Image (spheres, rainbow, N blue to C red):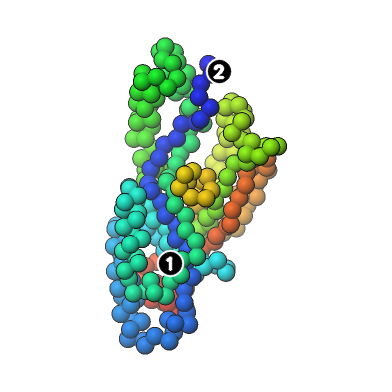
Amino acid sequence: MTNFPPVPLTLEGSATLHQFFAFDWTSWKATPASERKAIASEFLEFLYWAEQDILAPKSGIYSQLGHKGDLLLVHFRPTFEELNQIELTLAQTRLYAFLTLKHSYVSVVEMGLYESTRKTFEAAAAKGFEPHTPEWDADVAESLGRAKTAMASRLFPTIPEWKFLCFYPMDRKRDEVKNWYTVPFAERQKMMHEHGMVGRRYGDVVKQIITGSIGMDDWEWGVTLFSEDPIVFKKLIYEMRFDVVSAEYALFGQFFLAIKLPVEKLTDWLSGKL
């Protein structure tokens, strides 16, 4: 089959929000100690509520490195309404007066199905269904439903315990010279397969969560990596730059690096200790 739709199938899971804050240390240190203690205690309550389950946390807080911010909060939620509620509840805390939102990223956990899209489309065509007819759509939806059930743990992730986090947004090029969206499906499938094989070699030392953001934020995807060793981020991303899909078709936004901050350590962080 050569005339099936060019758009690869995707599975979507958790609504996702990354929040990057600068902290007003000058105002914080000028606040009386008793008030700081009360503010910190209230914020701890918010964080425990945001995590929801300490054994399978849906939110995480990180201490950022560099000038781009001081604190990073990452949230996974089943719906965007719940994600928005996290923002609103956070804004009601007294500590929020010391936070300045420097950057944020809204997206949804996404699994691209380049490997199985062709099989799914060809199976629908073999049944005599024409693309985008009700029969075709129903058959594809049934296939996606089975895949979503099988991949539920990856589509609705928890915050890993690993110490370091790297986040960056990215696009696929679509200019006069290189346009990912005009490349034939089979070629894109092959490139994505090779790209994925690099990532799989790092699977034991990196957890990767890809989130789609087309129509939600300024870039097309967000990539969040977790590891016990930040040097692994450097090695993985550097190696991936040599495959065709990255070397010829990728554009990258800012990179952010942060260290996991256990909730019980927040008071230490607010005292200038990690």
User: In the drawing, what numbered circle is on residue 2?
Assistant: 2
What residue is shown at x 49% (from left), y 43% (from top)? Answer: 214
Q: What percent of the width, then of the height, locates residue 99?
A: 43, 71
Q: How many marks?
A: 2
Q: Is residue 34 left or right of residue 106?
A: left
Q: What percent of the width, then of the height, locates residue 200?
A: 54, 41
Q: What percent of the width, then of the height, locates residue 111?
A: 45, 39
Callout 1 amino acid: Leu
Q: Is residue 142 left or right of residue 179?
A: left
Find numbered disc 1 in the image and state the secondary structure of the residue it sits on. loop
Residue where numbered disc 1 is placed: 261
Location of residue 70 with respect to 176 vertically, above or below: below
User: In the drawing, what numbered circle is on residue 211?
Assistant: none
Callout 2 amino acid: Thr
Location of residue 103 with respect to 146 vertically, above or below: below
Q: Decide which of 25, 119 is in the foreground and name it.
A: 25
- In this rendering, the label closer to the viewer, 1 or 2: 2
Q: Residues within 10 Å of mark 2 (few under 14, many from 20)?
A: few
For the question of whether residue 208 can be seen, the reply is no
